Image (cartoon, helix red, strand yellow):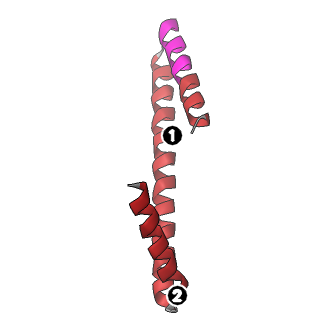
Amino acid sequence: MKNSLFEARKNLIGWIESLDDAEVLQKLIDIKNSASLEKCATNINSEKVEEQDFDQQFAAGMTPDELLENIASHIESIDSEENI
C-alpha cells in the first residue's frame, strides 16, 4: 500500500514539474487549499462540540463524580493529542 502511494505521488510530482498550464496549476492549488480548509473546519467544529457539551453539563449541574470523570477524559484527550 505504501509503495503504491509512493509511486502515485512520484508520478504526480513528475507530471506537475513538467506542467506549463497555469490554469491547471491553479486548479491543483485550489484543490489543495480546499482540502486544508475542510480539515481545519472539521477540527474546529469538533472542538466546539466538546466545548458546548461541557458548558451544557456545567450549566445543568454536575455531580462531583461526573466532574472528575470529565477532567480525567479531558486530560486523556490532551495526552493523546500530544502523542500524534
Q: Residue at x 59, y 30 (%)?
A: 78
Looking at the image, tell me whether mark 1 or mark 2 is earlier in sequence order: 2
Q: Are marks 1 and 2 in contact (CB under 8 Å)?
A: no
Give the quadrant of the C terminus. Answer: top right
Q: Residue at x 51, y 28 (%)?
A: 55
Residue 19's disc is none
In the displayed structure, would residue 79 be above or below residue 24? above
Give the quadrant of the N terminus. Answer: bottom left
Is 84 on the left or on the right of 12, as rendered?
right
Q: What secondary structure predominates along the stretch shown in magenta?
A: helix
Number of the front mark, 1 or 2: 2
Q: In the displayed image of the protein, which residue is found farthest to the right?
A: 82
At which x and y percent is residue 69? 50, 14
Report the front residue among 47 and 30. Answer: 30
Which range is magenta? 64-73
Around disc 2, counting alpha carbons within 10 Å, would you say few (fewer than 14), some (14 to 19), or many (20 or more)?
few
Q: Give SS at disc 1.
A: helix
Q: Amino acid at mark 2?
A: Ser
Report the front residue among 34 and 17. Answer: 17
Q: Give SS at disc 2.
A: loop
**Mark 2 = which residue?**
18
Q: Quadrant of residue 75?
A: top right
Q: In the displayed image of the protein, which residue is found farthest to the front?
A: 3
**Number of numbered discs visible in the structure rendering:** 2
In the displayed structure, would residue 48 be above or below residue 17? above
At which x and y percent is residue 49? 45, 37
**Mark 1 = which residue?**
47
Q: Residue at x 49, y 26 (%)?
A: 54
At which x and y percent is residue 2? 43, 55
Whether residue 37 is in magenta: the answer is no
Is 79 on the left or on the right of 65, as rendered?
right
Q: Amino acid at mark 1?
A: Glu
